[in-house]
Amino acid sequence: MKIPQEIQSITEKLRNAGFEAYIVGGSVRDFLMKKTPKDWDMTTDAVPEEIQKIFPHSFYNNNFGTVTVINEETAEESLKTVEITTYRTETEYTDRRHPDKVKFTPSLSEDLKRRDFTINAMALREKDEKQEVVDLFNGKDDLDKKIIRAAGNPDERFSEDALRMLRAIRFAVQLDFKIEEATFGSIKKNASLIENISKERIRDEFQKMILSNNPARSIELLQESGILKFVIPELEEGIGMTQNRHHIYTIYEHLIRTLRECPSKKLEVRLAALFHDIAKPQTKAGEGQDSTFYNHDFVGAKVTGKILRRLKFSNKTIENTSLLVKNHMFYYNTGEVSEAGVRRLIKRVGKENLKDLMDLRIADRLGSGTPKAKPYKLRHLEYLIEKVSKDPISPKMLKINGEDIMNLLDIQPGPKVGAILKVLLAEIIEDTDKNDREHLEDRVRELYELSLEDIKKSEKIIEEKKEEEDLKDKNKFWVK
Ligand code: ATP
Ligand code: MG
């Protein structure tokens, strides 16, 4: 593999001005693995002011000594900006969170020593057409053997910055590497130090694990290392807890397997796969083959929200994931699900989330040990969804709107108009023939006679009754 021209040119400019210049860190790791790095990080003994003099088209962005050089001409995304960082050492970590200060150093080795893993602690440059790797910790060897190993003494490195323990697991699952024994032993020993780390940093690593090709393995590694109980203790409640005659796996094992089988690459669907039965331990009633888990889906949506809020995920991620968990028990038995039932499902979940909900169900099935991802019943449901998708499911599809109602009754805007629309929609979802202008007008007049409270109540009654119907026996039938 060749070093891109843009990087060569930066190297030469620095060298012509009398400085050293190397590619460093993750980009060397990726380069040696013959993968194009997603960004090219460079390091030099020049200090920021000197770097900026050489590259007028750059900005100095923080007190970590990083200058970002802008390459406008390149079409390659990864080369549009290149970060150049002055060699630095990190001094003490008295709070175990941030290095107390960052100190520049003229020595490349000092810079490499502050880096986390042997495979991330190499520097590379091209000199006289030859590639030269500076590799103080035998990172090349570990790269070939697919090993994550702390650079230096693991206990020291993890107590300086405990996030590195999560990074070890993250790199192991992203690259499909093993964590070296002493390094893993040290993570076990220091697991509780993760409590010193900000939730945002934990979230970023956790998210990368979940989006990797081995998300399930990352949960297993978190558990084995003893970190899981500090980050998502709720998952540990299901360890060793058996279910009922419909399940061969314990709750914890089922969640891991569901995540492993998840066909979607979306964060929300994967998180929902991991958390969909998170409330089973707390809703379990009875023992053995006949135990039940009533409402674990609803409670689970709440628990999921709590976990994701704690980990500072965005509101959108929290909302979408909770919605999937809440609805993961949707009913789809052929012959028993009516078209009205499918319309209600679409209204409850939203058209845009149906594919995700299907993916979650496929994961749930495979994670339970059923051999077939998509049985006839699920395909039939997809057919029904397609079939009813033009039916009125949202207020927009009603043959009457708020304006019409106000004209008809000769009234001003007010809460009754919205409430009436909701009742009409609920009724029409049950029977689409009622989406007829004449019928709707009669119904509007009838409803208007009621008090606002009674109008709202009529909608609620329909909704609640139907929700109950859709979810009847959900504990019994679900996966088969
Ligand atoms: P990615 O592909 O995820 O960006 P990366 O190795 O480039 O992987 P970054 O977080 O971008 O990871 O960090 C760049 C480099 O900085 C790492 O390769 C490592 O050398 C060093 N580094 C980053 N975070 C730490 C840390 N917490 N402790 C020590 N060194 C670190
Ligand atoms: Mg990087």
Image: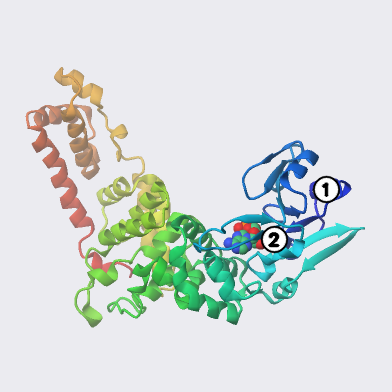
Q: Which residue is mark 1?
A: 14
Between 174 and 161, the one lying in front of the other is: 161
Q: Quadrant of residue 106?
A: bottom right
Crowding at label 1, few (<14), some or many (≥20) Cα neighbours within 10 Å? many
Residue farthest right in this picture: 128
- Marker disc for residue 25: 2
Instruction: Report helix, strand or loop for mark 2.
Output: loop
Q: Quadrant of the C terminus?
A: bottom left
Horizontal and vertical percent for residue 263?
49, 61
- Marker disc for residue 275: none
Asked if the residue at label 2 sits under 8 Å from ligand 1, the reply is yes
Ligand 1 resides in the quarter of the picture at bottom right
Colour style of the rendered protein structure? rainbow
Instruction: Inspect this view and state whether residue 456 appears.
Output: yes
Horizontal and vertical percent for residue 414?
18, 25
In the picture, measured across the screen, residue 203 lies left or right of residue 247, that is: right
Instruction: Inspect this view and state whether residue 330 appears.
Output: no
In the picture, measured across the screen, residue 406 lies left or right of residue 124, that is: left
Crowding at label 2, few (<14), some or many (≥20) Cα neighbours within 10 Å? many
Identify the residue shown where x is 21% and y is 80%. Answer: 287
Instruction: Report helix, strand or loop for mark 1.
Output: helix
Residue type for callout 1? Leu
Image position of 365 with respect to 43: above or below:
below
